[in-house]
Image (spheres, coloured by chain):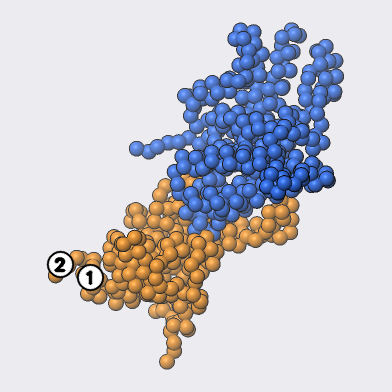
Amino acid sequence: MKDVNTEGYTTEDGRKIGGVVMEMKNITLRFGGVAAITDISFDIREGEIRAIIGPNGAGKSSMLNVISGFYVPQEGEVWYKGSRRPPMKPFEVARQGIARTFQNIALFEGMTVLDNVMTGRIRQMNAGLLSQAIWKGKAEKEETENRAAVERVIDFLEIQHIRKTPVGRLPYGLKKRVELARALAAEPSILLLDEPMAGMNVEEKEDMSRFILDVNDEFGTTIALIEHDMGVVMDLSDRVVVMDYGKKIGDGSPDEVRNNQAVIDAYLGVAHD
Amino acid sequence: MPEQLIFGMEVFLNGLMAGVLYALVALGFVLIFKASGIFNYAQGVMALFAALTLVGIMEGQVPFSHLINAVFGTEVHHFGWHVPALAAIFLTMVVMILMAWIVNKLIFRHLVNQEPIILFMATIGLAYFLEGFGDMMWGSDIKKLDVGLPQGINGWIDEKTFNIFDYGFFIDNLDIVATVVAALLVVALVIFAQYSKQGRAMRAVADDHQAALSVGISLSFIWVMVWSLAGFVALVAGIVWGTKSGVQFSLSLIALKALPVLMLGGFTSIPGAIVGGLIIGVGEKVFEFAIGAPYLGGATEIWFAYVLALVFLVFRPQGLFGEKIIERV
């Protein structure tokens, strides 16, 4: 029998899902005496769209912050690309190829859309200050390449018309898209999306869903996303982790999760004995 | 042409030159404020410290000689060599970068996400520490600084204006050099901030710490870089002011002159620091000449800048170029 853990599989719609790229092992995160996450394990495979869902306060965002290095769990291990990740600063995690967006949008409001997306390329920029000052050879080539990559992302997410607009002036939905563009510009191994559709109207939600699917399809980007809109998640994702009160109560394909009694109870509410 | 008008023109020009010097100090403030939201009260002392270090290195002074002699009963004062100006400037810059690194490591790294007032207090502490430290390291006597900048009346301007107006303008060569240096510095800083990747990262950090971290920018690196830059600006200001009036404690007080400049120009704008400096420089000189000396008994230069800043605070609190603060309710 084939080992799906290392070799992966092909989905019904023909997308290739690879082996495990990230694995969370027995993660526990506490703030003082309050446990935000208790002993949670799950994995993320290359090329898949992995969702983490759960009611408000379930610990989803905390989990995303653990993955991106903003929180350091008290217990448990994070395995990335086959080796255990030592405790790291968020910027080091980002440089390893894990890009993210934020629930409350964290953009550089005073900078233009283009400049914002360019900051996503910092991982790919190596030219020193001196060679930039002289503006020859390596630095020039690097800048051109990065600009080209950024323009591709901008085209792809259909934000060409606002390239030179300062981000602070954009409406909410577009800001979300710019943030996605910045994360995508980093050509991440894993793209973390924290409630990408929060606060959007139906039309914007549909747009965002389409972009997420297209990104995954076109670039083969591995995506892990948090969302509490069940409907959206079920349509988008390959596998779903369900959290409630900091614990994992379900993990599997959307269909499996949908029929899981514990999940139904968590979402609909059930009288506790 | 009436004599008064000709004198006025000379005063105006000298005001412009003085304004450039104010702007030089204000620039250091703006850099740090933009990137980290810290109002660096120590900027003036940094200029003093840079100038002290520069003189000390050039003269081959033994650092902490007073302390060493007191503890070990020795009599060392000088290494007995003289370091050329350029090499000494380079070494001083190394010291300023080292200082930036230490300041970040020991103080500001531990104050991330603190209230601005706490950060401000920390810089006040830093200012007094640095003042005492510089004193202990290099001694408190007034020192002469000469890195080879031209000084004295500019003969060419004197001659030309004499031919035209029958009255030669007195413009100091040092002021002209300072103007050129300041202009170059501003152009370099703007290019750096707008077009280099480090500059882009600096603007990103200034805008949003979290977002900067998430794209892989190291806050520590950027802060050390910004403090080094501010150290460099302090060094330039220290050289110019030190050459002009000797390296002494009062050098650190130029920081106080930079305050009204910042209120005028806005705390977040590099061009604002320049324009603000020029307005204050010209304003106080012309006011003294036209109103202060004849009608108010003179010495208006001491307070004019602050009154002007107050007026600005009432009518345009964000300064000429600062970002307008709009609070949504």
User: The residue tagged with tag 2: helix, strand or loop?
Assistant: loop
The quadrant the C terminus of chain A occupies is: bottom left
Quarter of the image for the N terminus of chain A: give it: bottom left
The local secondary structure at tag 1 comes to helix
Q: Give the residue displayed 33% in from the left and 76% down from the top.
A: A252
Residue type, numbered disc 1 = Ile
Sequence-earlier tag: 2 or 1: 1
| Chain letter for mark 2 | A
Choose top left, top right, bottom left or bottom right for residue B157.
Answer: top right
Marks 2 and 1 belong to one chain: yes
Most foreground residue, B324 or B291: B291
Q: Is residue A242 visible?
A: no
Residue type for callout 2: Ala
Image position of A149 (left or right of B66): left
Residue at which label 1 appears: A264
Determine the residue positioned at 76% across, 44% down.
B75
Whether A68 is drawn above or below A106: the answer is below
Instruction: Identify by letter the chain in orange.
Output: A
- Residue B242: numbered disc: none
**Residue A28 visible in the picture:** yes
Question: Which chain is indicated by disc 1?
Answer: A
Q: Quadrant of residue A257?
A: bottom left
Q: Is residue B14 left or right of residue A205?
A: right
Residue pointed to by mark 2: A271
How would you rate the neighbour count of disc 2 (Cα within 10 Å): few for under 14, some for 14-19, many for 20 or more? Answer: few
Percent coordinates x, y for residue B92 in the rendering: 72, 46
Give x and y (percent) for residue A211: 44, 62
Residue B219 percent across, percent down from the top left: 54, 54
Gap between marks 2 and 1 measured at Cα: 12 Å
Colour chain B appears in: blue
The answer to which quarter of the image holds residue B321 is: top right
Please state the horizontal and vertical placement of residue B158, each as a whole percent of the image.
Answer: 83, 20
